[in-house]
Amino acid sequence: MKLRIPQRLAALTPYQPGKPIEEVEREMGLADTVKLASNENPLGPSPKALEAARKALLSAHRYPDGSGYYLRHALSAKLGVPPRRIVLGNGSTELVELIARTFLGEDGEAVISEGAFVMYGIAVQAPVGEARFVPQAPGYRHDAAAMAAAVGSKTRLMFFANPNNPTGTYIRDHEMAHVLQRVPQEVLVIVDEAYHEYVSVPDYPVNIPRLERHPNLILLRTFSKVHGLAGLRIGYALVGSDEIAETLERVRSPFNTSSIAQAAAIAALNDDEHILRSSSTNLTEMKFLEKGLASMGVSFVSSVANFVLVLLGPRAEEISRAMLGQGVIVRAMRFFGFPEAVRITVGTRSENERCLSALARSLRQAGGPGESGRGAAEVDEVDEKQA
Ligand SMILES: Cc1ncc(COP(=O)(O)O)c(C=O)c1O
């Protein structure tokens, strides 16, 4: 059979997710592996969400509420955004794809930072769009001003990851204000805040009030990170105008979020204790990891999220394979555009200890940190320590 596959699809590389623990253990004959490869919550799901999901399973023979009425109202009560301006997605990545499919049009273009979360490029290029990649600013940061300046007549969308995965860096409040002021209202500004609950720096933008003033603003959020529900696939978009929400609703698949996920999300949203415990554990453990990395003489990018980009030089992939051999799964970052780095998700104390000792051993085997990994400094050339 000779399928007629569009040329641009033949050129796309599929997203490479972190390997599931079961797959690694099966393939490598290991047990007791530690997975620090997909920026998940090491404390697990909110217990309240688990209870709600169990109850919802009893009605699994029914289709879900396609409008997600109760979840949208719960989000509205918590965040102060009208329910009609909240769109639910099968994880926030589905919303990235939905937005690209809906708004790019025949010959539209999206402005994206180099080194940004890779799904933006894939979602834009898979249907019909062009991606205009803007070089990063020093310190592995989005260059927000250069991105705003790159907007042209074909630009329909701009994607900002704040904080960004895999760099862990963030866009400052004044940079966000500049973008929203500068960019014409026909261009949708999408700010992906998947990790916002982890951020504790004072100049991180609080964007929800901006939805009132900027009808072209879209904020993306997820239950996959601090809420610990990555396996249930649920996220949401907060949008600046009814028009955006209504258009997305026309394209969205009717039952894109399951009844189990909706029920769990409502409970997780209001489980403040779990949110707080998860974010404060992350802060403590991030410091522990950073200290361990610095004591080995390894460079890393200062992160405000729940993962850290570790700069290991040309041997990064070899080192990540050696760590895998010791039962610690981290993520080599070639596919994300950083061939000399691995990304480590912050785990529990015992997971982080295992990770650091596996890294130390792998580094010794590889003869120490490579060229770009040499020197104990964290990389943050721009200004103050971020977290
Ligand atoms: C920046 C960013 N946005 C979105 C996602 C995906 O979230 P979801 O599980 O809601 O699709 C990730 C996951 O790693 C991410 O890093």
Image (cartoon, rainbow, N blue to C red):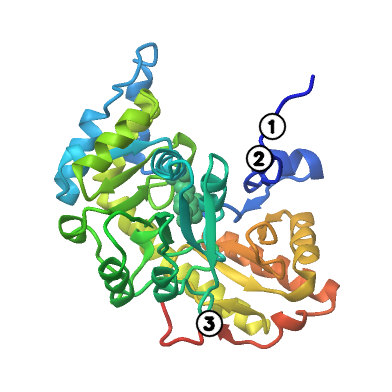
Question: Earlier along the polypeptide chain: callout 1 or callout 3?
Answer: 1
As helix, strand or loop, the secondary structure at mark 3 comes to loop
Q: Residues within 10 Å of mark 1 (few under 14, many from 20)?
A: few
- In the foreground, 210 or 184: 184
Q: Distance between the residues labelled 1 and 2?
A: 7 Å
Mark 1 or 3: the one toward you: 1
| Side of 65 relative to 136 (left or right) | left
Asked whether disc 1 touches disc 2, contact meaning CB atoms under 8 Å apart, the reply is yes
**How much space separates mark 3 and mark 2, taking CA atoms?**
32 Å
Q: In which quarter of the image is the C terminus?
A: bottom left
Q: Report which residue position mark 1 lands on.
A: 5
Q: Does label 2 point to a residue whose CB lies under 8 Å from ligand 1?
A: no
Front residue (pair 110, 32): 110
Badge 1 element = loop
Q: Mark 2 points at which residue?
A: 9
Quadrant in which residue 68 is drawn: top left
Image coordinates of residue 71 in percent, x first then y, are 25, 35
Query: Residue drawn 78% across and 58% down?
Result: 321
Q: Which amino acid does label 3 sit on?
A: Pro
**Res 43 seen here:** no
Crowding at mark 2 (Cα within 10 Å: few <14, some 14-19, many 20+): some
Mark 3 surroundings: few (<14), some (14-19) or many (≥20) residues within 10 A: few
SS under mark 2: helix
Give the amino acid at mark 2: Leu
**Separation (CA) of disc 1 from disc 3:** 39 Å
- The answer to whether one can see residue 140 in this image is yes
Residue linked to disc 3: 138
